[in-house]
Image: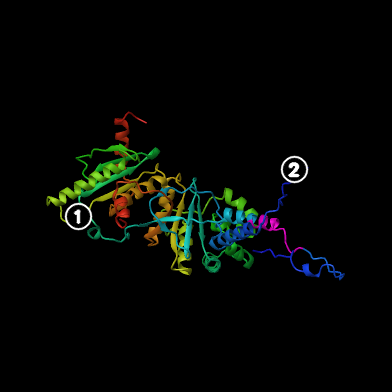
Amino acid sequence: MAEMDTSSGGGHKKGTGVKKPKKLSTRIDLTPMVDLGFLLITFFMFTTTLAKPKTMEINMPYKDPNMKEEEKNKIKNSVALTILLSKSHRVYYYEGIGEDPTKPPEVKVTYFNQKNGIRDEIISKKKMVDAMKASGQLTAKDQMTVLIKPDTTSTYSDLVNILDEMNINDVKVYAIIDISEVDREFIKATEVANGGQ
Amino acid sequence: MGHAKLPRKSTNIDMTAMCDVAFLLLTFFMLATKFKPEEPVVVKTPSSISSIMLPDNDVMLLTVDTKGRIFFAIDNKVKRKALIEEVNTTKGLNLSDAEMNSFAIGASVGVSFSQLKSYLSSTPEQQKNIDATAPGVPSDTVATSAANELGAWVTSARMTNPKLRVCIKADGDASYPNVAKIVKTLEGLKVFKFNLITNLKAIPPGTAAYVEANSGKK
C-alpha cells in the first residue's frame, strides 16, 4: 500500500543516449518505526488502568446524638439475626437481638465458606421470616434484619465479606453496630465451649 | 548444468501492515488510558460482587493500609488548591504559595497538620520517603474533637466541593477499629452514604443476587 512502483517508467527511452538520473527507491525500512510503535504500546499497557475500580455503596443509618429514644427504630426479635465478626475470620451468629439477659441466645460459629458457611444461615433465616409472614405471625412490613457487630479483632475484609453476603442474599435491611460487652461474652463462652483458643 | 535454478526470494518483509497495526493499537491505548493515580501505599482491597463504577470526578479517597494508617486525597488540581487554601486559613498553618502548590500537584497526605508544612516543602522524592513511614492522618471516633484531623480534612473538603463522594479504600487486612474510626468520623459529620472500593468477584450461583442478575436475559 505504501510502496510505489518505481521499476517501470523510462523503459521506452532505452538506448537514446540521454543520461537519465539514477532513480532512488522510495521504499523506507519501517522496522525501527514498528519498534517504536510497540515500545509505546508496551508503555501505555503498563501504565493504563483499563478496568476502573469497582465500589460498593453503603448507606449508614441516620444517627444523631440528640435523637430521642422513641424516634429510634425498634426491630422485632423474631426477624433479627445477629452476626458477630471475630478473629481469624470467624463468624458467630445467633437468632434475635440478644437483649434478654435471662435467655441467652444460642451462639453458633461458622466461617465465610461457600458451603455450610454464613450464607446458608442467612438464607434459612430469610426463609423462616418469609414463612412467618405467610402464616400471619408477622405483617408484610416486617423484614428480615441482620445486625452486624464487628469485634475489634476482625479485619476490614470480614466487614466487606459480610456486606457482600447481604448483597448476594438480597437482605434489604442490615446495620453495622458496635459490639457490646455482652456479645463479647458470648464469643468467649462459645470459644470455651468449642475447646478453647 | 541441468540444475533448475531456484529463484532467489528477497528476505525483506513489507513492514507497512505491521506498522499500521502497531500504531492502531497505540492509538487505542493512548485514548483509553487513564494514568494510575499515585498511591502512597500498596493496598490490597477485598472482593465483592458489587459492580458499581467509581465515579470519575469529585472523589475523596481515604486510603487505609494494613497498619491502619490513613491517607487523604481528593481529585482535581483546582479543588486541591482551593482545599489547601481553606485548610491553611482555618488551621493557621502559614503555608507558602510554593508549599500550597506542592499540595495541589501532589497525591495524598498522610501526616498531621503540625507536620504538613515540612512535608509539603520537601521534594516529591522526599515526600515518598516520608509516606513510607508517615503515621497517617490522625483520626478518632469522635468527629468534632480537635484530635480528629481527618474530620477537619473532610469538613474542609466538603466545604470547597459539596459534591464530593467519599470513597474508602482499605486493605483487607486492616483491622476493623481503624476502619470504624473513619466510619464514625463520617457519621459524625453527617455523611451517611459512602463507597467502599472493592475488587469484582463473580456472583455465586444459586443465590438471590445470581437469580436477579440473570433474570433480565433469557
Give, as a three-letter code, the residue at label 2: His
The residue lying toward the viewer, choosing from A168 and B197, is A168
Quarter of the image where one finds residue A85: top left
- The residue wearing badge 2 is B3
The image quarter in which residue A25 lies: bottom right
* Image spot of residue A165 (x, y percent): 33, 48
Circle 1 SS class = loop
- Mark in the foreground, 2 or 1: 2
Residue that mark 1 sits on: A142
Under mark 1, the amino acid is Asp
Residue B147 percent coordinates (x, y)? 47, 56
Chain that bears disc 2: B
Camera-nearest residue between A186 and B20: B20
Q: Hey, which residue is sitting farthest front in the picture?
A: B2
Magenta highlight on residue B206? no
The residue lying toward the viewer, choosing from A169 and A68, is: A169
